[in-house]
Amino acid sequence: MKAYAFFDVDETLIRPKSMFDFLQYWYEHTHGAQGPAMHAERWASIRVLINQGMSRHQLNRLYYSWFAGVSYKDLELAGRAWFDQRCRAGGLFKEAVVQRLHTLRQSGIEPVLVSGSMVPLLAPLAGWLGVEHLLCAELQLDGGLVTGELLQGAIGPEKQLRLHAFLQQHGVSAKACHAYGDHISDLAMLEAVDYPHAVDPCAALREVAESRHWPILLSEQLTPA
């Protein structure tokens, strides 16, 4: 029976939040001498919004609005450069979780990346991992320029909807599928499959995982092959 393993990306497969990590690179490499100050101001506003209770869904939409008018090609080039820089620096991936992904694939379970992040950041990462399938934020374009709006998102319950649509498209049941996530916002995705796994979970997800007897994986305690 064909099966898939759905992996959240940020803080599950990689250590940082890709969108915010890239944002610093973007400002520092595309806004000249003013870039660091602009990033610091933007990051301060993000922290305020989070402290005020802005949801991940709302923040995700706001984030993409900041790229309105940007050439999608430039965003792709910057995403590739950011990824290359992060790989050279080391420590980007949770190696034990990456090894779990490869082990599943070797057993015939195909990995799928599911993330609120965008293709320009995730495509290089997927290529490095050898992952074919991406379910992520899809940017609306107008003549090659980003409009700041999304065609599709992949935050919270949207992950479950995208997962179900993917399985329906491929004619596969969720019963044999796996999912991996770190945050309570991944709960709907984890609930959609028969084999959910909490990876370095936040307190809320850990509580759910323990109550339902789901496997809890602590990446620092896993041993890469």
Image (spheres, rainbow, N blue to C red):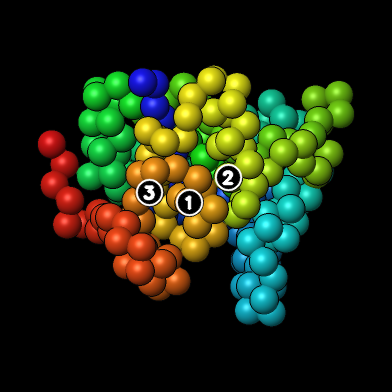
The residue labelled by disc 1 is: 191
Q: Amino acid at mark 1?
A: Glu
Residue lying at 80% horizontally and 25% vertically, measured from the top left: 144
Where residue 147 appears, as percent x and y from the top left, is 84, 39
Where residue 194 appears, as percent x and y from the top left, is 39, 43
Residue lying at 35% horizontally and 56% vertically, measured from the top left: 198
Q: Amino acid at mark 2?
A: Gln
Marks 1 and 3 sit apart, C-alpha to C-alpha, by 7 Å
The residue labelled by disc 3 is: 196
Residue lying at 54% horizontally and 59% vertically, measured from the top left: 185
Q: Which mark is residue 160?
A: 2
Q: Are marks 1 and 3 in contact (CB under 8 Å)?
A: yes
Q: Earlier in the sequence, mark 1 or mark 2?
A: 2
Q: Earlier in the sequence, mark 1 or mark 3?
A: 1
Res. 97 image quadrant: top left
What is the crowding at mark 1: few (fewer than 14 residues within 10 Å), some, or many (at least 20)?
some
Say which quadrant the N terminus sits in: top left
Mark yes or no: residue 127 visible.
Answer: no
Where residue 127 appears, as percent x and y from the top left, is 43, 24
Where residue 50 appears, as percent x and y from the top left, is 63, 72
Badge 2 marks a residue whose secondary structure is helix
